[in-house]
Image: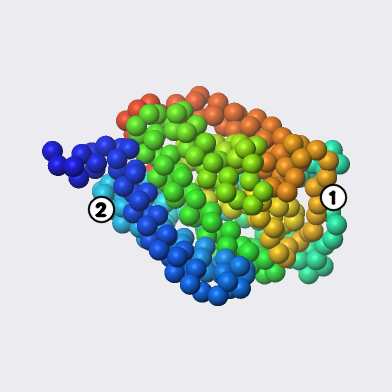
């Protein structure tokens, strides 16, 4: 058997090859952008260009890898065109709700303080909240999309006007990370070792990948591993949908940064609904890295994650080695 055939027949070998094929063009893109003026690279526009181009490259390479290397359709790995809007909106609502609970706890304990608010952004916030609540209600009742859904979606977009550039940056980041860490790493590890080991290993890798972020620390990596790695992976296990995982990731990040004005994984985002500050013990609030690095977030999301793991286990969705996943009913109907 040739070396190429051996690599393609091994789950881990195929994973390494797929990661290399994705990371090489992203590395080339990053180095090309480094040739541009430093002022542009460090600007919001530069961040937007890098994130959107990287996301587009990763989506294209990911699709080619599924088709050419794994002989699967995008629907087989949870990236189908059907119901993408419904699943993303529901995931976004869940992620936003979880961050809201974290901020509420930090507020009650005196760690989160609003220092300012943008008047126009608050008006947008009203549109965003109403549209998101009604869309979520409609999507939980039916998967069909009608005229009223499109009206609400337009209102939802109105709610993102002042944070539109930041939102696009966050979309690019969420797509990149979910396709790589859930679409590739978790899925291939699950095939080799089963859901439980894949859940833990992919979460650890996800956390350590954020150590290089500004103000990165071990507790920050632990927080990211739990709030991002474990939560997104168990959501993927329950739904077998990358759109759900992208939605949760995006909702968590949007409400943490642009909405509540907190640091986002060590990054400070300009513009948003509220300006805020975190005070008190850093171990509780997360300090300069953001709420996800604090015990308040880690404890709350761990509890929710354990509950979801329990549900997945009771529904026999935690797979053993080489066991194919079952397709959720909503995808069977799609």
Q: Where is 310 relative to 37, above or below?
A: above
Look at 37% across and 57% down and name the residue there: 24
Question: Which percent across, then down, holds residue 186?
Answer: 43, 39
Look at 49% across and 25% down and name the residue there: 313
Look at 42% across and 46% down and name the residue there: 183
Look at 53% across and 54% down and name the residue there: 174
**Residue 194 appears in the picture as rendered:** yes
Residues under numbered marks 2 and 1 in contact, where contact means CB atoms less than 8 Å apart: no
Question: Which percent across, then down, holds residue 115?
Answer: 85, 57
Q: Which residue is mark 2?
A: 68
Disc 2 element: helix
Q: Determine the image quadrant of residue 43.
A: bottom right
Residue farthest toward the bottom in the current orientation of the protein: 37
Q: Where is 84 relative to 201, above or below?
A: below
Dot 2 crowding, Cα within 10 Å, few <14, some 14–19, many 20+: few
Q: Which residue is mark 1?
A: 113
Give left or right: position of 305 versus 175.
Answer: right
**Residue 144 appears in the picture as rendered:** no
Dot 1 crowding, Cα within 10 Å, few <14, some 14–19, many 20+: some
Q: Determine the image quadrant of residue 81.
A: bottom left
Q: Where is 204 relative to 71, above or below?
A: above
Disc 1 element: strand
Q: CA distance from mark 2 to mark 1?
A: 51 Å
């Amino acid at each position: 058997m040739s070396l190429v055939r051996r690599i393609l027949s091994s789950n881990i070998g195929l994973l390494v090859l797929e990661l290399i094929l994705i990371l090489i063009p992203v590395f080339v893109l990053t180095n090309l952008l480094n040739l541009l003026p430093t002022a542009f690279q460090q600007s919001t526009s530069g961040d937007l260009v890098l994130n959107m181009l990287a996301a587009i490259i990763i989506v294209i390479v990911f699709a080619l890898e599924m088709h050419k290397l794994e002989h699967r359709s995008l629907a087989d790995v949870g990236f189908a065109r059907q119901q993408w809007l419904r699943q993303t909106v529901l995931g976004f609502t869940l992620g936003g709700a979880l961050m809201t609970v974290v901020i509420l706890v930090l507020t009650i304990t005196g760690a989160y303080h609003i220092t300012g608010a943008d008047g126009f952004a608050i008006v947008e916030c009203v549109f965003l909240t109403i549209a998101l609540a009604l869309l979520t209600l409609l999507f939980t009742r039916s998967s069909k999309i009608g005229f009223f859904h499109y009206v609400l979606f337009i209102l939802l977009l109105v709610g993102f006007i002042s944070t539109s550039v930041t939102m696009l940056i966050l979309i690019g980041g969420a797509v990149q990370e979910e396709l790589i860490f859930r679409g590739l790493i978790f899925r291939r590890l699950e095939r080799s070792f089963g859901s439980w080991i894949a859940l833990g290993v992919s979460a650890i890798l996800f956390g350590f990948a954020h150590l290089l972020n500004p103000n990165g620390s071990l507790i920050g990596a632990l927080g990211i591993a739990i709030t991002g790695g474990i939560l997104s992976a168990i959501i993927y296990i329950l739904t077998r949908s990358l759109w759900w995982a992208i939605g949760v990731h995006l909702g968590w990040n949007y409400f943490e940064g642009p909405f509540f004005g907190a640091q986002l994984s060590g990054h400070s985002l300009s513009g948003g609904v509220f300006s805020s500050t975190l005070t008190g013990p850093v171990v509780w609030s997360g300090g300069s890295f953001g709420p996800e690095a604090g015990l308040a977030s880690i404890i709350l999301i761990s509890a929710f994650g354990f509950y979801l793991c329990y549900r997945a286990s009771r529904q026999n969705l935690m797979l053993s080695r080489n066991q194919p996943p079952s397709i959720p009913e909503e995808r069977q109907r799609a």
